[in-house]
């Protein structure tokens, strides 16, 4: 094996030659470098994470079976619409409970802009859902309303849980639509 | 705890992008300004300062882990002690308070708090994604993570509960942008009307682009010291403005990351756990709240900030403030959204819970010396965001809470005219003010009271 005598040239990324630069590097020329415009280069950063849902995993498994779970403190009965392994007040492990299929819109918005990941989906409707007998809310997508006709009248609307047939193990495996029957 | 004085500060010009300098060099602009304002040169101050606290929010924006140590070494502060703090949008406010702790505890006599953010290195929608990663990545972010969306949901509930209007929200935008016309450090300096705000592109209904702060590059720094620190600085030739500005109240609160998980407390729990001293002591207020709860209101729900109320109550107690509206001469608060300014009026006790909307449009939070082109029914009482706030100054996250500290120091020193080259924003005889820094959907909130030595008004 021969010892390389130079770094191999490559064709990737930005390639530049002889950017404008003073030929004679005297004091004036070196001082003049402070006037140089900034050089900006692209730096890519892309990571795939292996994310664990940990103790919340049954919640996602339930969605694949068209079931929406919540968490309940066995002592106080305080019920969370989101999974929560331990109760905030007692510190004790919670029990899984099945949430109602229907709830009401507590608050909402129509996103006309968003994070890069969701830009193609704009406009989309986010809503917080309240359930009878449940003490906290649930963030979800609201489908079946006209994003161009947003109205405070949507608050209090009865909505029905719907599930993706092709579940993705994401919280969007469940979404809500206006309930047909009150 | 020992008395702590906030003696000087500096801010870089907040801008959409600062490609001309790296983050270290942008921090140095603010740092140098703070040093020179007390008449010291760089080597002399380096000799005297005991250590620092550094503040920036996102490793994603910087694409550089441990960026703070790169600032520390650029400023020539190695090997003095330092640490970086991070708490979302409240990072700067936390940094200020950690510097206070360093001095108040006796750990340091002179401490510099510096912070920065360089948000221009990614496109706006990618920046929104980074910010949204400061929401639960299992349950909130994947649903459509977008902070403007989260805040817009709070607004719709606030409107539903209390009748708050979009025009009341817009009044905040008009006020803060107009104030910034006189602040050369601000990024957006515009004279707007209510109609302008409502006609701006819709971002998350009902919030338009002019209801929301922008992303920025920028830095800020504050110098805090003890009495011994003062003596050392002045013995070295520092010229420190008198009367001194003292940190008189420090409070911090927290709340659940998922706003859906927040409680909906009943009247008794609210009065016991969250009501201000003034609210507890007033028959009229208690009766008002009884009626509110009878009509279904709860606290904090998704439309109020329990962390902010906790921080405010804590800071007010330490500072001996019972009636914030009349005992504070100004507040610099975290108005990332016009709606969050309105919500924060309520949680800082500037008005009653539920009355933030009418309060915003009343004129009580406006500066008396400016003409906003609005029909304001009440006289100014306690100007809020006289600098222009986040909405107009910009929000380079790690710098923002420190920027508030710098502007508060200048208000209390009476030196706004000197630093801005325009005295229009100077509050006459400002003796006591509060700065308020806020993270996430209200997850970490800091409130710090500063006052001029010689007594508050």
Image (cartoon, coloured by chain):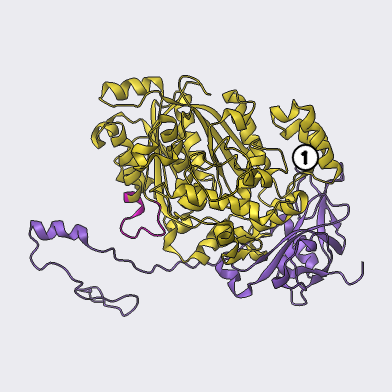
What's the residue at 47%, 41% (across, down)?
A: B404
| Residue B317 colored in magenta in the image | no
Residue A65 position (above or below residue B289): below
What residue would you read off at disc 1?
Answer: A89
Nearer to the camera, A115 or B154:
B154
Please provide percent x and percent y for residue B74. 30, 46
Q: Judge by depth and name the residue closer to the eye, B181 or B124.
A: B181
The chain holding disc 1 is: A
Q: Nearer the viewer, residue B128 or B435?
A: B435
Give the residues drawn in magenta, as a range. Answer: B14-25
Q: Is residue B455 above or below residue B146?
A: above
Residue A36 lies, in percent from the top left, at 22, 62
Point out the image quarter for the C terminus of chain A: bottom right
Left/right of residue A102 with respect to residue B451 in the rendered view: right
The quadrant of the picture occupied by the N terminus of chain A is bottom left
Position of residue A141 measured from the top left corner of the image (x, y, whole percent): 72, 67
Secondary structure of the residue carrying tag 1 is: loop
Counting the numbered discs, the total is 1
Q: Is residue B282 above or below residue A139?
A: above
**Name of the residue lying farthest toward the right:** A182
Residue at x 70%, y 71% (from the top left corner): A147
Q: Please indicate, yes or no, whether residue B53 appears anywhere in the rendered image.
A: yes
Is B135 positioned to the left or the right of B192 in the image? Answer: right
Q: Is residue B397 visible?
A: no
Q: In yellow, which chain?
A: B
Q: Colour of chain A?
A: purple
Residue B391 is situated, as x and y percent measured from the top left of the image, at 52, 52
Q: Quadrant of residue B312?
A: top right
- Residue B306: name its quadrant: top right
Q: Residue at x 59, y 68 (%)?
A: A113
């Amino acid at each position: 094996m021969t010892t390389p005598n130079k770094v191999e040239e490559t064709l990737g990324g930005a390639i530049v030659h002889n950017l404008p630069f003073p030929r004679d590097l005297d004091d004036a020329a070196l001082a003049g470098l402070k006037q140089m415009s900034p050089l900006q280069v692209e730096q890519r950063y892309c990571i795939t994470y292996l994310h664990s849902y940990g103790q919340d995993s049954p919640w996602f498994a339930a969605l694949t079976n068209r079931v929406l779970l919540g968490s309940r403190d066995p002592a106080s009965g305080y019920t969370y619409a989101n999974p929560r392994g331990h109760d905030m007040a007692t510190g004790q492990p919670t029990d899984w409970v099945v949430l109602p299929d229907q709830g009401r819109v507590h608050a909402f918005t129509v996103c006309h802009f968003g994070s890069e990941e969701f830009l193609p989906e704009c406009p989309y409707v986010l809503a917080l859902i309240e359930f009878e007998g449940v003490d906290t809310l649930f963030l979800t997508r609201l489908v079946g309303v006209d994003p161009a006709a947003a109205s405070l009248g949507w608050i209090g609307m009865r909505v029905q849980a719907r599930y993706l047939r092709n579940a993705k193990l994401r919280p969007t495996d469940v979404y809500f639509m206006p309930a047909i029957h009150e | 705890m020992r008395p702590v004085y906030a003696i000087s500060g500096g801010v870089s010009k907040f801008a959409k992008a600062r490609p001309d300098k790296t983050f270290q060099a942008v921090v140095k602009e603010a740092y140098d300004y703070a040093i020179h304002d007390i008449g010291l040169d760089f080597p002399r101050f380096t000799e005297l300062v005991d250590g620092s606290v550094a503040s920036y929010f996102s490793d994603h924006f910087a694409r550089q882990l441990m960026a703070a140590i790169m600032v520390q070494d650029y400023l020539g502060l190695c090997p003095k002690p330092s640490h970086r703090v991070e708490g979302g949008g409240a990072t700067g406010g936390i940094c200020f308070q950690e510097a206070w702790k360093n001095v108040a505890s006796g750990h340091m006599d002179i401490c510099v708090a510096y912070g920065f953010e360089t948000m221009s290195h990614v496109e706006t929608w990618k920046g929104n994604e980074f910010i949204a990663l400061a929401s639960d990545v299992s349950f909130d972010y994947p649903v459509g993570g977008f902070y403007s969306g989260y805040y817009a949901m709070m607004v719709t509930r606030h409107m539903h509960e209390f009748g708050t209007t979009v025009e009341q929200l817009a009044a905040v935008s008009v006020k803060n942008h107009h104030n910034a016309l006189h602040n050369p450090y601000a990024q957006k300096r515009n004279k707007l009307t209510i109609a302008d705000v409502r006609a701006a592109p819709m971002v998350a209904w009902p919030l338009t682009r002019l209801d929301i702060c922008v992303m920025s590059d920028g830095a800020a720094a504050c110098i805090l010291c003890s009495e011994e620190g003062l003596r050392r600085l002045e013995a070295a030739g520092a010229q420190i403005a008198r009367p001194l500005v003292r940190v008189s109240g420090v409070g911090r609160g927290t709340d659940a990351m998922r706003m859906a998980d927040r409680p909906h407390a009943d009247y008794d729990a609210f009065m016991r756990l969250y009501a201000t001293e003034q609210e507890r002591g007033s028959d009229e207020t208690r009766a008002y709240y009884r009626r509110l709860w009878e009509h279904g209101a709860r606290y904090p729900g998704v439309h109020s900030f329990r962390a902010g109320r906790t921080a405010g109550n804590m800071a007010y107690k330490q500072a001996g403030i019972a009636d914030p509206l009349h005992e504070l001469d100004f507040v610099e608060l975290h108005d990332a959204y016009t709606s969050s300014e309105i919500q924060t009026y309520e949680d800082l006790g500037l008005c009653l819970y539920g009355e933030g909307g009418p309060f915003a449009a009343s004129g009580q939070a406006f500066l008396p010396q400016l003409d906003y082109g609005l029909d304001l029914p009440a006289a100014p009482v306690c100007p809020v965001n006289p600098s222009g706030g986040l909405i107009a100054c910009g929000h380079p996250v790690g710098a923002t809470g420190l920027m508030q500290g710098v502007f508060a120091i200048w208000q209390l020193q009476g030196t706004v005219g000197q630093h801005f080259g325009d005295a229009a924003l100077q509050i006459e005889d400002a003796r006591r003010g509060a700065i308020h820094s806020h993270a996430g959907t209200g997850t970490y909130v800091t409130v710090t009271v500063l006052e001029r030595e010689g007594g508050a008004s």
